[in-house]
Amino acid sequence: MKTSYKYLLLAAAFSLAACQQESEDTKSSKETVKQEQAVDKGEVKGAEAKHTETTRVDEHSYGNLDEVELKHLDLELNVNFEARSLEGFVDITFDRLKDGVSTLVLDTRDIDIQKAQYMTDAGWVDTEFDLADKNPVLGSKLTVELDDNTTKARVYYRTQPQASGLQWLTPEQTAGKKHPFVYSQAQAIHARSFIPIQDSPAVRVTYKANLKTPKDLLAVMSAFNEPDTELDGDYHFEMPQAIPPYLIALGVGNLEFKAMSDRTGVYAEPGLLDASVAEFNDTEEMVKVTEEMFGPYRWGRYDLLILPPSFPFGGMENPRLSFITPTVIAGDKSLVNLIAHELAHSWSGNLVTNATWRDFWLNEGFTSYVENRIMEELYGKKRATMERALDVQGLRQEVEALPKGDTILNVNLDGRDPDDAFSGVPYTKGQMFLTYLENKFGREVFDEFLVEYFNSHAFQSLTTEEFKKYLNENLLEKHPGVVSMDEINVWIHEPMLPEMMPNPTSDAFTTIDSKTKAWLGGETQLSEMGSAEWTVHEWLHFINNLPEDLKLEQMKQLDQAFSLTDSTNNEIAHAWLMLAVKTNYDVVMPRLETYLVSIGRRKLIVPLYRELMNTDEGAKFAKRVYKVARPGYHPLAQGTIDEIVGK
Ligand code: BES
Ligand code: ZN
């Protein structure tokens, strides 16, 4: 198997994370979850149940969504770096959907609950609560007793240092080395590790938050952030737009802000601020072209928070404030499709949201499609096509290795952790489905459909079934005879990649393929490859398509000609290091060690550890390096790599 591009790797990282959960113990608990929930919710199980699912049922939440509808949160939290804990309380305001509702059922994971109250005319009164035993996937169900009328509850709590949704960093683990840092990552089901909440994407809340921090640090949230906030250790936030819990986010550190336009800017540690602004200063243009294509940006400001290199993802679309890995600061804007992607979620995902994690492709497929449209608009067709072709090559390789069920867009999670089914499928198969519709109906018609889809579902969550109905009524039936519902069902419910899938081809890549062939056949020299003009994408295609049985002599020639071991582009370095491990080109080992110790982004490091573990020598190296690197990694990355390398 050849090295692939982003999704294959990202998926590898996730499926490994999944393995972590796959102990017998966990499996049986998962079964228990499924059964408990079926009973709790009066859900009918069986094949037909899949199509009668409503947005008020989520197999990944214990919450009584059918009884209580959350509306608003007020958070009062002290950010305690010594104890590695958020301490305080949350007030939850809700509507009652039925008569006789006597409990508020919430999700938690590893949270200490100190007290629960509800609001009466006479003020707050203490109430009973029950914190159930921990389920390894879902965490602990928290049941708060209510009286007959109350619509507000308060929970006093403390997060634990190992909260899966938080990373606490020592000063040494930051760029500046002087101040600690903490940030949250709630998607998919980690909000419950730092807020007791109905942690389902079908839930939407507005929120206000007060965060108390050490005085010299700045706090930011996925809410309105005042660009020139005074540093005083006391920060107030307001998010007036209703968002799902997985989009609630915070970051606290030695952060400075620099504006890129009236509504876009960057928060970063001082040492990274200028490089970040230089890399990402097309953001305003990105917002503009997306608005022109898909309707207004409805969230006010759009800022970026640059995280420490241990952030386990490329980016996270927290509303008004995308969280971004510093590993894409390449100096040449070559990896800014990440920004286009996280920005695109302001339409697909944050505005129109998957109702359950089975509908994740509605978030990521639409976002990958919009991302690529932004890239085309801003950087031209050639680059957009190359990015699509790299992703599709990755997808084709990936589906061969995935369990068949996980190649279905509307995947059956069947009591599994949503992370277990993570792959490039919702991303690239989803994107290709929409590209197929665009090709069939024409860009103009399809864009009109998308604009209306975003408008009519703004600030709502929907299931795949609801999407299909909307698609049928607003596209298929309006233009009869173009695409049938049978074809739609193949895309959405059948495994693997359909025959009708578009196959993006890049002329630039075809040229590289023939030159590579000529070099491998001994007909030409590396100096004749024409590589002086190559973009990062061409380099990635070139390296990803080199045979894995290259001779050491050939690896040496490549390195001498192109200095690949010294590449400062983290994606190119990743592709090259993968090839080097596979071909036993051990010249790279010192570079590989630095790479693994300084980066915590799972997509970049997990495949390398896994490849290393294939040989005794490699495994020895991996174990030694992991010992040094592990304390700097996010709990999610630690969990994943513990499974591969051992603690
Ligand atoms: N929302 C995702 C990240 C995510 C997915 C976190 C599932 C937790 C669970 C984000 O928008 C994303 O897709 N990031 C990619 C960006 C890439 C596709 C350009 C990443 O992190 O690599
Ligand atoms: Zn995404």
Image (cartoon, grey):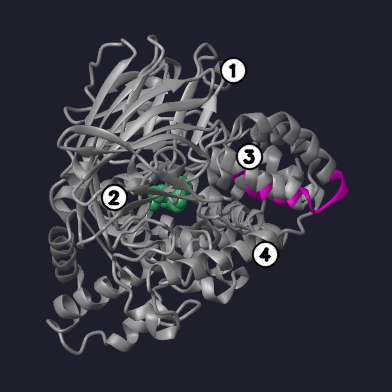
Q: Nearer the viewer, mark 1 or mark 2?
A: 1
Instruction: Name the residue: 24% across, 16% down.
Output: 229
Q: Nearer the viewer, mark 1 or mark 3?
A: 1
Badge 2 element: helix
Q: Between tags 3 and 4, which lies in front? A: 4
Q: Which residue is mark 1?
A: 172
Three-letter code, disc 3: Phe
User: Could one spot residue 314 in this view of the protein?
Assistant: yes
User: Residue 374 appears at what percent x and percent y?
Assistant: 27, 51
Inter-mark Cα distance, 1 to 2:
34 Å
Q: Secondary structure at mark 4?
A: loop
| Sequence order check, earlier mark of 1 and 2 | 1
Which residue carries the number 4 mark?
A: 1
The secondary structure type at the circle numbered 3 is: helix
Q: Which mark is residue 427?
A: none
User: How far across and down, in percent of the image, does residue 502 sit?
Assistant: 39, 73
**Of the two numbered discs 4 and 1 in the rendering, the one whose residue sits closer to the viewer:** 1
Direction from residue 493 to residue 53 in the image, left or right:
left
- Identified at 68% across, 31% down, the residue is 629
Of the image marks 2 and 3, the number of the one nearer the N terminus: 2
Determine whether the beta carbon of the residue marked 2 sits less than 8 angstroms from the nearest atom of ligand 2: yes
Nearest-to-viewer mark from 2 and 4: 2
Residue range (magenta): 604-617
Q: Residue at x 26, y 11 (%)?
A: 230
Secondary structure state at the residue bearing disc 1: helix
Question: Few, some or many C-alpha atoms within 10 Å of disc 2 (few <14, some 14-19, many ≥20)?
Answer: many
Is residue 618 placed above or below 513 in the rendered structure? above
Q: How far across and how far down the image is residue 150, in percent?
A: 21, 46
- Callout 3–callout 4 Cβ contact below 8 Å: no
- What amino acid is found at the position of numbered circle 1 in the picture? Glu
Give the residue number, with chain letter if any, for mark 3: 562
